Amino acid sequence: MNDFNEDPFHLAGQAAAAIAEQTGVAAHDIALVLGSGWGEASELIGETTHTLDAPTLPGFHSPAVVGHVGTIRSVLTPAGKRVLVLGARTHFYEGKGVRSVVHGVRTAAAAGCTTLVLTNGCGGLNEAWTPGTPVLISDHINLTAASPLEGPTFVDLTDLYSPRLRAIAHEVDPALDEGVYAQFTGPHYETPAEVQYAKRIGADLVGMSTALEAIAARHAGLEVFGISLVTNLAAGISPVPLSHAEVIEAGQAAGPRISKLLADIVGRL
């Protein structure tokens, strides 16, 4: 189902109201979108008090990607904050429209969240970043030729990926590197020439998510933090052909370490 004919903010409000009704939580504080390799983090952030089947909520769809779950969790942290864990991510390449891609972000804002944590599994352009390396997102390049904003909606993206939140992440792990994330459309992996193009225009990481969500988050007034897991070296840099199985394997291998890192960061937000 494509939700193009329904006002996206009204739909997000409906979803947020359903979440509040089913969880009994009037407002959440932090939204967390879990990408490939990051699934274990929700277990370490705090106590999951409610787990909702995302497709039963207005505007949400079942996940189309192996390694993604179709649930939305309400998690209570030891500090007493409420985290909305969005496991039902819709990707641009699924063909459901940009509104569906950013519906979770808009729902989080409508649910009261003021901070958004975006995670993903991605290809690395830096040979020093071996599979399993977490990298903070300092900026992005949107190569989808699309935007979640419609009409004369002009939003400044100068400091989209919060310097304040990145500083908190560096307090947790001073060794964390930072990089620029380029979102391609997918679902095919990039060609070696496309990877070199991305590198020449300033990208350090390539993937198929995050940028559109971050733009929608800024428009909604959320403070954005992004972190990528390098699951493989990108095409032309990697000496072997790429596969989604490789992405899953790298995520599973790095899962415990990066999940603890993310939980420690979220605990300070």
Image (tube, rainbow, N blue to C red):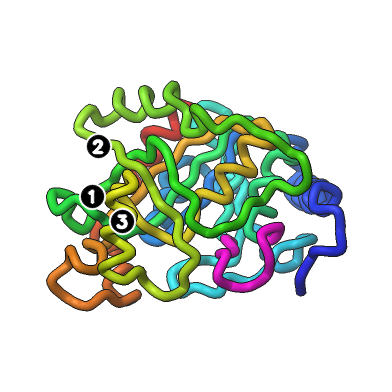
Above or below residue 30? Residue 4 is below
Q: Are there few (<14), some (14-19), or many (20+) residues within 10 Å of tag 1? A: many
Q: Nearer the viewer, residue 214 or 39?
A: 214
The residue mark sitting in front, 1 or 2, is 2
- Residue bearing the label numbered 3: 255
Q: Are there few (<14), some (14-19), or many (20+) residues within 10 Å of tag 2? A: some
Q: Label 3's element?
A: helix
Q: Which residues are magenta?
A: 88-100
Residue 115 coordinates in the image, percent (x, y):
57, 33
Which residue is located at x 45 percent, y 55 percent?
183
Which residue is located at x 58 percent, y 53 percent?
86
Residue 71 coordinates in the image, percent (x, y):
60, 62
Above or below residue 70? Residue 110 is above
Q: Which mark is residue 220?
A: none
Above or below residue 241? Residue 186 is above
Q: Nearer the viewer, residue 60 or 193?
A: 193
Q: CA distance from mark 1 to mark 2?
A: 9 Å
Which residue is located at x 44 percent, y 31 percent?
267
- Residue bearing the label numbered 2: 177
Q: Earlier in the sequence, mark 3 or mark 1?
A: 1
Q: Is residue 95 magenta?
A: yes
Q: Is residue 189 magenta?
A: no
Task: Say whether residue 176 is left or right of residue 152.
Answer: left
Task: Say whether residue 251 is left or right of residue 143.
Answer: left
The residue mark sitting in front, 3 or 1, is 1
Q: Which mark is residue 133?
A: 1
Say what amino acid the circle numbered 2 marks: Asp
The residue mark sitting in front, 2 or 3, is 2
